[in-house]
Amino acid sequence: MKKILFFVGCSCLLVACSGPNRALQERLANADSVAINYFSGDGSMDSVVAIKIIRNPQQVGQLVALISAKPVKAENKCGYDGSLHFFKRNQVIQDIDFRMAAGDCRFFSFMQEGSRQSTALSNEAQQLIESFRE
């Protein structure tokens, strides 16, 4: 019986850890706009080459869903291709960096509860972020 309970407990833990980041979803649920900074693409954060503001609630919600989808362990050596700044009534509620150009380094990175967290950057998320730039 103990083995069964242990197995069920481990299974629940694995499912919970691989699911969406609910805390991030709740934090971003009330965002009314997003500012996207696109960097030069070499991984450094010091060269913003374009900025786009998204105010469409449907697009903001789609971006939130993609960002919070699946936790991953990200490598700090990868650098970033851009940053997202979520706003509510002209106040920043969350800053999120992203890397999408490198095949083995594709993630969103953000501070949550005092520690750096990362989630997967899917092909769909990359396409959406790139479509905003056009």
Image (cartoon, grey):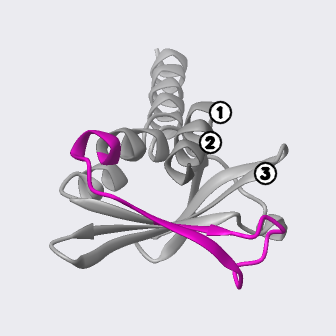
Say whether residue 75 is magenta: no
Type of residue at label 1?
Asn
Please indicate, yes or no, whether residue 112 appears anywhere in the rendered image. no
Q: Residue at x 82, y 64 (%)?
A: 78
User: What is the x, y in percent for residue 125?
Assistant: 55, 39
Local secondary structure at mark 1: helix
Q: How many marks?
A: 3
Q: What separation in Å lies between label 2 and label 3 (alpha carbons)?
A: 9 Å
Local secondary structure at mark 3: strand
CB atoms at circles 2 and 1 under 8 Å apart?
Answer: yes
Which residue does the numbered mark 3 point to in the structure image?
Answer: 101
Q: Quadrant of residue 90?
A: bottom left
Q: Residue at x 72, y 57 (%)?
A: 74
Q: What separation in Å lies between label 2 and label 1 (alpha carbons)?
A: 5 Å
Q: Residue at x 78, y 51 (%)?
A: 101
Extent of the magenta region: 36-60
CB atoms at circles 2 and 3 under 8 Å apart?
Answer: no
Sequence-wise, the earlier of marks 2 and 3 is 3
Sequence-wise, the earlier of marks 1 and 3 is 3
Local secondary structure at mark 2: helix
Type of residue at label 3?
Ala
Which residue does the numbered mark 2 point to in the structure image?
Answer: 126
Eyeballing the image, is 26 above or below 41?
A: above
